[in-house]
Image: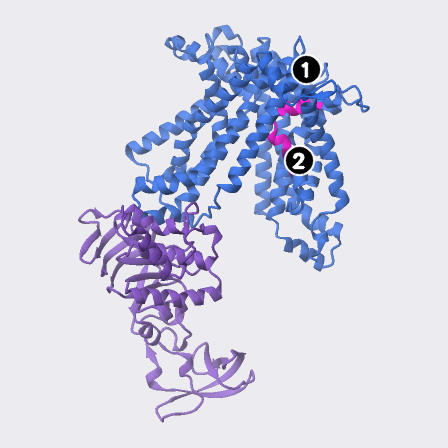
Chain colours: A purple, B blue
Amino acid sequence: MGEIRIRRLEKAFGTVKALKPVDLTIRSGSFTTLLGPSGCGKTTLLRMLAGLEEPDQGEIYVNGECFFSKDKRTNRPVHKRHFGMVFQDFALWPHMTVFENVAFGLRAAKRKTGLREEVMHALKTVRLEGMEKRYPHQLSGGQQQRVAFARAIAIRPGLILFDEPLSALDAVLRDELRAELIHLVKQMGMTALYVTHDQTEAMSMSDEVVVMKEGEILQMGTPEQIYGTPAHSFVARFIGKSNWLEPDKRMLRPEHVRWSENSASDQQFTAIVKHASYMGDRYELELDIHQGSGSWIAYSPTRLAAGEYVQVYVSKEHIHEIQA
Amino acid sequence: MPLNSLKPYNRIGMMLALILLGLLIVLPLLFILWTSVSKGSSIDLGAPLRNMLEHDLSQVLFNSIWLGLCVIAATTVLALPLAWMMAKTALRRHKWLDIVLLIPFMTPPYIGSMGWMLFMQKNGYMEQFFPASSAVTPAFFSFGGMVAIMSLHLFPFLYLLLRNSLLQIGGSLEEAAAVHGGGFLYRTRRIILPLLLSGYMMGALLIFVKTIAEFGTPATFGRKIGFYVMTSEIHRYISSWPLDFGKATSLASVLLAACLVMWYIQSVISSRYSYRLVGGKGSGARMLPLRGWRGLICWLYVGLLLLASIGIPYFSIISASLLKLRGEGLAWSNLTLSHYADLLAPGSESLRAILNSLGLAVVASTIAVVLGTWFALTVGRSSRPGQKLVDLFSLLPNTVPGIVIVVGLILFWNAKWMPIPLYNTYGMVVLTYVILFLPYTVQYVKSSFNQLDPVLLQAGHVFGGRRLYVLRRILLPLLLPGMLAGWMMTFTISNRELVGSLLILPPSMQTSATYIYAQFEQGAVSMGMAMAVVSVGVTTVMLVILNIFSSKQKVE
């Protein structure tokens, strides 16, 4: 299993800077997610790692081995990087059976002995035993997605790349497969790099989250760090909901807005309820804050009428200052 | 039960459509088969083939097949490299090439052939540019030359098919192969070629059918070099003495059967072996940059191809129409516009032919659009057997060679028992054009209709629109672009149509196509080519106007 080190990697398409110089280290055996809105450069970074796109500058090392270096004029071709990849549209070859799709990487590497066992093992891992003779169009979306995953793990790759693999599926299937996928990756102890624009996916699956915007890495850390101590106002807004005491400087998360005073050091705010939405387990309130700017979100176990005046309390330790 | 009135479908309308299609298209074709297999009271299914073999027509059959195969090979050689360049290299950015490449395909084959003949003949333009070439130009007037002319006309068709397949394969399907360890050769062999094959097979079959069905080149170039194929022989047996309808119908029925079999094979391939290639993100596919010698080779290839498929024929046609005296060759002092003046002189035979062509085209395309829209709406989403039958019948003239349809129409409407005296009238010409070009409107309208979300019509009903109101206010306006495209296509093609005009026109009548053909045959090349320029020019201008008009409408 490999450690990936990326140094000063950058890429421009014409005059558009898709990726500004980026440094990134992916620990061996970790599940790392690149998270950001579309056009933030996350897919470009992934494709450059895979070798599908050539960087303009920088270096890529896998386990200390140089895969790409502009200065050293090294560029290992795509098919020699020994990665697995799950594509957004699955990219299953329609003229091949499930078995042949999964066997492709092994056949390309001229593996003959134990080929059948390897393929069947991969299919068993994704719970598709007995489907090996079918063609991709005879499978459901979820099954196709599993074949794509089996194909990627069959070659026992050093790194497995996911390019928004769940975005083509419907919501229920997505939740189900998300859990299954993370379970399998962890079970096999593989290093994984996952690209998504869905913060729920990123937060629930990853060991490390890399938040990107406009070709730059804004913050990298565990999901807890990203949520609890965002390093950038964009990160604070993009992940979860944020209430601002001072725009782009001091914020707190909605679950820390309380209805009673805990200690004398608590800050007190007067607010008008603008709107209450029932979420099943609680009410989500939109509050108009007098002292602050704009509106806040707060959670309440009971319904409050719009227009009502309320007092809310915030502890000092829950207020996060953004350093940048 | 879903709201049935939403589909413009009803039983009576469909029956009417079927009866009309049966009378106009199916019966005449059946009539050919019946005439060729019936001998008095007995029926002999092998008669057409035997008739051909007995009367030395087997050579003609063989010629057609050999020509078809050679044209497949030549179009592949021309189209495959171009498709690869346009799919995989930076050449892809030059979208205008796709439009330019439609020109050879839209040029009537007989006009293209005439251009080539003028260019390569003794003392032709080739020899005037390069006198030394007179050693090789005679070699052009051979089977190889004929294959070249027909391939240069048909290759854009195969090119578009191959390029689209390559583009679709080129996305994530190829990338997935690369990531999972497939080198260039390995993934080409295991992924790209197998996926390209079904598309190529269909394209090749269509090229074959189009080649053996073509009349324009065999009638001009083929006749000159003495290479006879089925279409040209059918024409000979029904238009020049000694007439032999027996042989003509035998040939026509064999040609008909061959084309139907090919289309059947093609539809089997497309349903069984074609994969729905959902193109992923197109941006994914990398483009090979074209620098240095690579760029040079690519542009040279494209340049030569455009020169051969457009440059040479059009240069020959236009310069032939401008020359004062052909003997004096190409020189600025030898240029004149007088042929055009003669051509358009009031009261002249040529002007009458032009106006006649335009008139016929307007009437025929208008009728074809009305009928075609009706049939297309009857077909709808072709869910019922009756709808599928209407679909099949209305597209038949696209499947069957034009000359076969025309023979069927002659046999049918000229039969002794036919009570309607349509044969040898203006109406017969209109009818022939309408039938020949009906599939264009049907296809265009059908595709516009299939793109419509049924919800749009349902919304119309929900907001209180009655059937006819919804039809008038929602359906027709949305179908209008399709109908317009169908009208334009029918107008363009029927304005230049040669086969139908040659065989069906009443004795005293001429169209621009027959005028060009006759002038060329009689050696009045300048007048013929001036007519060709006018006829191609008029339709091109109309297409351009339509394009501007429709793009303006989109902006508003």
Q: Indicate the position of residue B109 as horizontal and vertical percent values.
A: 54, 22
Relative depth, front residue between B540 and B519: B519
Nearer-N-terminus badge (1/2): 1
Hey, what amino acid is under mark 1?
A: Phe
Question: Which picture quadrant has residue A28?
Answer: bottom left
Subunit that carries the residue with mark 2: B
Q: Is residue B397 magenta?
A: yes
Tell me if residue A247 comes above or below residue B267 in the rendering: below
Quadrant of the rendering where the N terminus of chain B is positioned: bottom right
Hey, what amino acid is under mark 2?
A: Ser
Subunit that carries the residue with mark 1: B
Residue identifier under label 1: B245
Relative depth, front residue between B467 and A215: B467
Q: Indicate the position of residue A213 as horizontal and vertical percent values.
A: 35, 62
Residue A15 visible: no
Measured Cα–Cα span from mark 1 to mark 2: 27 Å
Residue lying furthest bottom: A264
Q: Indicate the position of residue B105 as horizontal and vertical percent values.
A: 52, 28
Tell me if residue B51 comes above or below residue A108 in the rendering: above
| Nearest-to-viewer mark from 1 and 2 | 1
Secondary structure beneath dot 2 equals helix
**Magenta stretch, overall SS:** helix
Q: Which residues are magenta?
A: B392-409
Residue identifier under label 2: B394
Left or right, residue B229 beside residue B132:
right
Q: Are marks 1 and 2 in contact (CB under 8 Å)?
A: no
**Of the numbered discs in the image, which one, if any, rests on residue B554?**
none
